[in-house]
Image: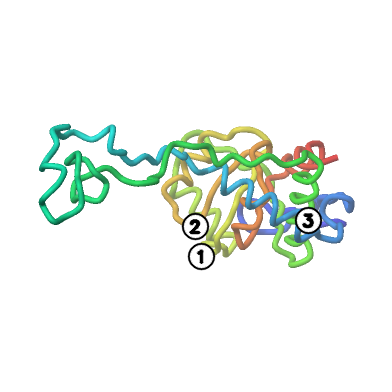
C-alpha cells in the first residue's frame, strides 16, 4: 500500500511511503481493540480514593448514653456510621486498577486500529518537521497549509521532538507523540493520524 508524502507547505512531494500490508491492511479485530482500550483506560486510574472508617475519624470514644431505658437503640460511640459525622461503611479504599494483556493481543489491537485508519483514508504521511525553537504560530501555519486546522489530529514522530511537542501543547485538537508511545486508544482517539516520514518505519519495526 503506497501513500503520498506531503511537505510542510501542504503540497504533495514526488516521494511515496510504502505501508506494510501486514500492519496497515489486516482484517481488524474489534474484540482485541476493545480489550486494549479497556486496559489503557483502566491503567490511567490512580486508585488513590479513600474514605475514613469509624476507627479513623476524630471523635470521643465516650459512651454517649446509657445502655438501657432510653427507648431508643443502644449506642456506644459518636463515631457510629449511623450518626451524622460518623465513619463510612464499606467506603472506597486505595487499590490498583491495572489490567494485564497478552503482548500479541496488544499488537493485534494496534494493527487493527491502524488498518481502520488506512481503510478510511485517515492516515497522512508528512516530511520531517524540524523547528529551531517552540513556536505555536509555526505549527498552526503547517496545519493551515494542510487544511487541517479544525481536525482532531495526532502527529506521530520517529523520535522525541521537544520543539514540535511544545509548539502543539496548548492546542486543544492537536497532539504530538513519539512512535514508541503510540497506543490503540491514541490511534482511535483522533480523526486523522499524521505520520512524520521516519515514524512509519518505527511503527512497522515495533509491530513486526
What crowding class fits label 1: few (fewer than 14 Cα within 10 Å), some (14-19), or many (20 or more)? few
Percent from the top left, x then y, of residue 170? 41, 48
First in sequence: mark 3 vs mark 1: 3
Residue drawn where x is 60% and y is 33% of the image: 160
Residue found at the far front of this picture? 69
> Is 77 left or right of 174, judged from the image as shown?
left
Q: Nearer the viewer, residue 176 or 143?
A: 176
What residue sits right under mark 3 in the picture?
112
The residues tagged by marks 2 and 3 sit, at their Cα atoms, a distance apart of: 23 Å
The residues tagged by marks 2 and 1 sit, at their Cα atoms, a distance apart of: 7 Å
Q: Quadrant of the C terminus?
A: top right
Q: Nearer the viewer, residue 82 or 172?
A: 82
Percent from the top left, x then y, of residue 173? 49, 57
Q: Quadrant of residue 2?
A: bottom right
What crowding class fits label 2: few (fewer than 14 Cα within 10 Å), some (14-19), or many (20 or more)? some
- Tell me: residue 113, above or below residue 85: below
Residue drawn where x is 46% and y is 40% of the image: 47
| Mark 3 element type | helix
> Is 7 left or right of 97, judged from the image as shown?
right
| Color theme of the render | rainbow
What residue sits right under mark 1 in the picture?
150
Q: Nearer the viewer, residue 2 or 186?
A: 186
Percent from the top left, x then y, of residue 206? 78, 37
Q: Nearer the viewer, residue 185 or 3?
A: 185
> Mark 2, mark 1: which one is toward the viewer?
2
Q: Quadrant of residue 152?
A: bottom right
What residue sits right under mark 2 in the picture?
173
| Mark 2 element type | loop
- Tell me: residue 103, above or below residue 3: above
First in sequence: mark 2 vs mark 3: 3
Q: Are marks 2 and 1 in contact (CB under 8 Å)?
A: yes
Amino acid at each position: 500500500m503506497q501513500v503520498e508524502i506531503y511537505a510542510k507547505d501542504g503540497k504533495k512531494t514526488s516521494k511515496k511511503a510504502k505501508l506494510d500490508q501486514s500492519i496497515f491492511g489486516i482484517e481488524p479485530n474489534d474484540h482485541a481493540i476493545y480489550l486494549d482500550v479497556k486496559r489503557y483506560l483502566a491503567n490511567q486510574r490512580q486508585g488513590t480514593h479513600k474514605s475514613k472508617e469509624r476507627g479513623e475519624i476524630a471523635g470521643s470514644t465516650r459512651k454517649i448514653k446509657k445502655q438501657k431505658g432510653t427507648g431508643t437503640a443502644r449506642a456506644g460511640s459518636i463515631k457510629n456510621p449511623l450518626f451524622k459525622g460518623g465513619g463510612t461503611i464499606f467506603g472506597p479504599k486505595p487499590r490498583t486498577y491495572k489490567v494485564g494483556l497478552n503482548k500479541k493481543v496488544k499488537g493485534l489491537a494496534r494493527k487493527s486500529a491502524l488498518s481502520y485508519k488506512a481503510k478510511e483514508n485517515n492516515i497522512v504521511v508528512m516530511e520531517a518537521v524540524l523547528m529551531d525553537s517552540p513556536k505555536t504560530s509555526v505549527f498552526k501555519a503547517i496545519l493551515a497549509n494542510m487544511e487541517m486546522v479544525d481536525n482532531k489530529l495526532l502527529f506521530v514522530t520517529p523520535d522525541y521532538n521537544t520543539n514540535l511537542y511544545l509548539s502543539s501543547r496548548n492546542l486543544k485538537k492537536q497532539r504530538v507523540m513519539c512512535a514508541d508511545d503510540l497506543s490503540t486508544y491514541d490511534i482511535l482517539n483522533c480523526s486523522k493520524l499524521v505520520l512524520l516520514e521516519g515514524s512509519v518505519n518505527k511503527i512497522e519495526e515495533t509491530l513486526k
